[in-house]
Amino acid sequence: MTAPAADDLLAWLRASGEEMHTHTLAALLEEHAALARAKEAAEAANEAKTRFLASVSHEIRSPLNAIYGYAQLLERGTGDGAQNGVEAGKVIRRSAEHLSNLVEGLLDIAQVESGSLKLARDTIRFPAFLEQIVAMFEPQAAMKGLALRLDLPPTLPEFVRTDPKRLRQVLINLLSNAIKFTDCGEVVLRAHYRNELATFEIIDSGIGIAPADVERIMLPFERGTASAERAGVGLGLAITQALVTIMGGDMRVESTPDEGSRFIVRLMLSRPLSPPADLPAHASTHFYLGRERTLLLIDDDPAHREALRGLLEPRGFRVLTAQGGEEGLALAAQTQPDLVLLDVSMPGMGGWEVASQLRQRHGPTLRIVMLSGEAADSGPQQSAVVPADIFVTKPFDFDHLLDVVSAQLGLEWPQVASHSADDKALPALVAAEAQPHLAEIERLVRIGHVRAIEARIDALAAIGPDAAALAERMRVHLDAFDLKALAALAATGGTR
């Protein structure tokens, strides 16, 4: 029966005084309308997911093709030597990061929908954190001829507490979109901080967003009509808004089509009561203090075992490896390691079972770090006592893993030694030429602009041998992220 015919019948029943039949027919018509609306919603959702699968297929295949092609070149030894190998490594790493971020995005959507997403509270170097994020996009912006600026006030605190992974994800998603949808002009990341409230503005001069699309693009798998031809799976803004909400903040959009957009994110980021102890970042020659610590890595993936061994041994650790649970338990009994890095998913005896037996045999003095691509709450739910000390999700940044190992073992790291043999004043003529560079380095240290500091140190080194020696001492402090010592060295002109 058509809708007009049903309406005519309902009107006739009412006119005839057939109350019971009128109510029955009205209920049937309302149920039919609800079913029709549900059918339309299901068809729309199915169409959106079909578009998503088509997009995500491209997003997966492109980096996989790059990884596969460069891996074949490396395997066959084809190319022009070491430089080609370095470039291949960069492409493989970037492609792997793209795939990792895509998988993370899909998992994040699932965790947000299920309400199981958990936040960390870590201390970060705030200006350096933002500078590093912007530095990630400099090549991408340069390829499009865009100006990419980081606008930070001098009053920005050096340290704040937040979930660095989620804050990084929010800013990366917004910056990535800003660059993607801007063809000329500039993209700016601006930050403000007052009374522990951080405000981030991501401003672009791109294609803008139509008013009708502003709410829709925040939904999973959706993109604006003006940007449909541009790459993307439609997850970034949905995840970003969800993460900002979960972190207790808010996000709003101001946009004018063909003029640009401004995304404004506000989050509460508290300051730590005291600054954290520093690890010597990116300095493989720095060892921890005290006796040699033994780490046992239990993982069925040989590539993962060798990669971690190559990263940890240069830091002074003794690294033992086992490819399975039984071998790992036997090796632990023989060597009494200080800490075990344990993969969760292994054939035969799983990681949680191995962790439980390690805890029973060696007690609480043995530190156990679980490594897995699964969620942290995927462990043994039936037991009130979790046998591991901490859970690290793959893929992880090596510096983060080093932080975890250092904290679990209570390691102390040496301060960068001063170069007393070189602690002498610059010659007068050299000092006069170096002074503008030193003053600028002092200023850049205050705002934490690491990339600009590196450039100024290079300019200082170009003055001459005496200035080059001072520049090398500055690089040591910068590599160790000892900005206080770097500022003091710049202020004294090398006599400290």
Image (spheres, rainbow, N blue to C red):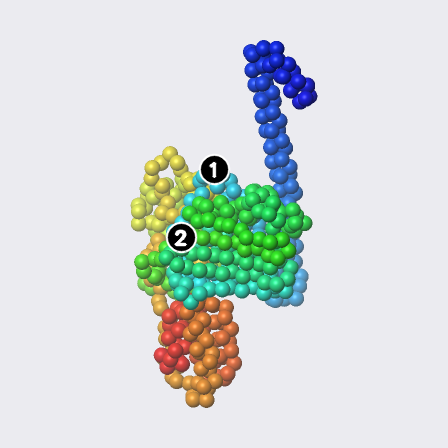
Q: Nearer the viewer, mark 1 or mark 2?
A: 2
In the rendered image, is residue 492 in sight? yes
Q: Position of residue 344 (x, y in %)?
A: 45, 43
Which residue type carries mark 1? Answer: Ser
- Name the secondary structure under disc 2: strand
Q: Is residue 409 left or right of residue 225?
A: left
- Residue in the picture at 46% in, 80% down: 436
- Residue in the picture at 67% in, 49% down: 229
Image quarter in which the C terminus is found:
bottom left
Image quarter in which the N terminus is found:
top right
Q: Is residue 414 left or right of residue 137?
A: left
Q: Position of residue 131 (x, y in %)?
A: 48, 63
Displayed quadrant of residue 123: bottom left
- Residue in the picture at 42% in, 85% down: 426
How far, Cα to Cα, is label 1 from label 2?
24 Å
- Residue in the picture at 62% in, 26% down: 36
Displayed quadrant of residue 6: top right
Circle 2 residue: 268
Q: Position of residue 61 (x, y in %)?
A: 64, 48
For residue 114, the mark is 1
The residue furthest front is: 15
